[in-house]
Amino acid sequence: MTDMDNKDIQSQDSNLEINSQAEEATADFSIEKSGQAGGLQDSVQPVESAVKSDTESGSDKEQIVLADKQTEEEKKKALKKAQAMIGAKMLGKGLLEKLKESVISVAPIAAIILILCLTPIVDIAPREIWTFVVSAIFLILGISLFNLGADLAMTPMGEHIGSGLTKSRKLSLLLIVCFIMGVLITVAEPDLSVLAEQVSALLPSSMILVIVVGIGVGLFLVFAIFKVVFKKNLTTLLMFFYMVLFSVAAIMIDSGKGDLFPLAFDSGGVTTGPITVPFIMALGVGVASTVGGRKSQENSFGLIALCSIGPMLAVFILSLFMTGKLEYAIPPYAFAENIGAELAHTLGSSAKDVAIALALIVGFFLVLQIIVLKLPKRRLIQIGIGIIYTFVGLLIFFTSVEMGFMTIGFKLGQALATFNKPLLIVISFVIGFVVVLAEPAVHVLNKQVEQITNGAVKKRSMLIALAIGVGISIGLSALRVVLDFSLLYFIIPGYILSLGLSLFVPKLYTAIAFDSGGVASGPLTASFILPMILGACSVLNASKALSLAFGVVAMVAMTPLIAIQLLGFTAITSAKVKARRNIRRIVDAHDEQIIEFM
């Protein structure tokens, strides 16, 4: 590049710099001029725009906050609505499932009774048949609602009380609460009221029997909680208490009160009814899960087994102080002429009994909720809904049983005893086999057993074992009425066999068996089977109704002990046989191998 070229470039750069300076000066002059011409206007406009922008931004923020609040409220409302819809759908689905189970449970016993009523064996009017059919339909609805209510309310209440009081680490408080709850739920148990009314002629007041039995249940519930907390062996406790029980029974029989022996054993069965069972079972689960341990599942069972001993021992002791001649008249069983008036009366009395029963439990639960438990509002709402389902279900159940099943059972027993005695025994076995399927508490027990054992004890296996056991017990009760012999010939060998089996089968099967004995003897046993045996007794031996007819509940409570423990014994034996076969196959396979030494 030459010197001339460099000078040209420098001159161009200087011209560009001069031009730029000129443009900047012109721009500054124009700005000054515009400011002088309209100074106030130009100075006010920026202030107004700033204020305006601040005002607009503030209102926008308020609108955004309000919109966010409305959006959150709408979301909460939508969430609550969605939860309510989901809850309603789940309740509807659960009720539908319970209805299916109830139909399967009630249909067999209803079908057998209808078939017998349509034969020449039983003389019954069409109006009475229709009353029974309607009662059976409502019985299905009642069982369904009760089972749903037990899942929503009774079981959670028991679990929360058990776990909450155990976590408080106050053993004295736990035991006092359990004693009070044991007394309250027993006094409120409708099954016990039915039995007490049927033997009210033996005592100055039927409430004496109810209160004595309630105290017995409360004391033995305390023993049961001791067993769970300190993880004591159930078999040892059962052997000890049954030895005490039979010792007191021997004293009672020696004092000339032997006719009350069947009644005492019946009282042990009826106390573990539809209200008691879900609560006590769940209470045991709650305490055992909180205490923990390697065998917490097995430890949760056995409460019902021990609670069944308390009433029997209490009635034996009560009988020692009774004076006067023991007389019992079979109550009259007949369909009412005015069905509407009878229905209104039955609904009223049943509503009163169930309301008192639930009010005692719920009231005590609320006291514990305020003092100890402090459960969230959502859980309390669920329990409240469950209580309503339980109340309506039990009301329908007891009304249906009293309106349609008690009288039909009595007439059926009379007709079969008149027609053919062997047929009475056979039909009693068949009815016993299917009647246990319609007991509400049986389904609660079976479901909890299957859940707690993680499917090791199947619901179907439990039902079959219970059905066989109850069928045999009612068949033997009919045989006892026909041949006229003492209940002791069944009870003593039966309990010796039951306690003997407990030494050889897994402890879990023993606990389940003794719990199921109390559960199987529910409302239908007291309200249908007992009237049926009383009907047969009124034909064959009416003067010994107290000693012959009573005891059927005791038989129903005893035979499942043997049946379910035999189920456990069979399971152990088959498992050992399979293990030996597998070992033999492995050994035989190794023996067949040929080893060549080089």
Image (cartoon, grey):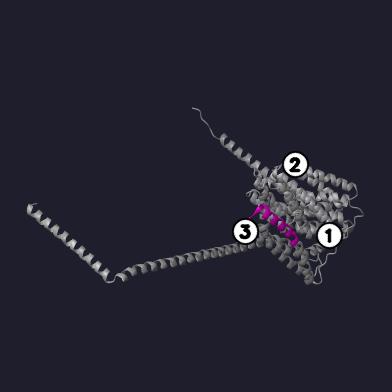
Question: Residue 46 versus residue 182: which sits nearer the camera?
Answer: 46
Q: Which residue is mark 3?
A: 377
Q: CA distance from mark 3 to mark 2?
A: 43 Å
Q: What residue type is disc 3 on?
A: Lys
According to the image, label 2 marks what residue?
236
Residue under the point 70% across and 51% down = 281
Q: Which residues are magenta?
A: 354-379
86 left or right of 270 in image? left
Q: Nearer the viewer, mark 3 or mark 1?
A: 3
The reply to whether the magenta stretch includes residue 412 is no
- At label 1, the amino acid type is Gln
Q: Tell me which numbered mark, 3 or 2, is placed earlier along the sequence.
A: 2
Labelled disc at residue 198: 1
Q: Quadrant of residue 411?
A: bottom right
N-term-proximal mark, 1 vs 2: 1
Residue 466's x, y, as percent? 72, 52
Whether residue 563 can be seen here: no
Question: Which residue type carries mark 2?
Answer: Thr
Disc 2 residue crowd, few under 14, some 14–19, many 20+, Cα 10 Å: few
Residue 4 location (% of width, % of height): 7, 54
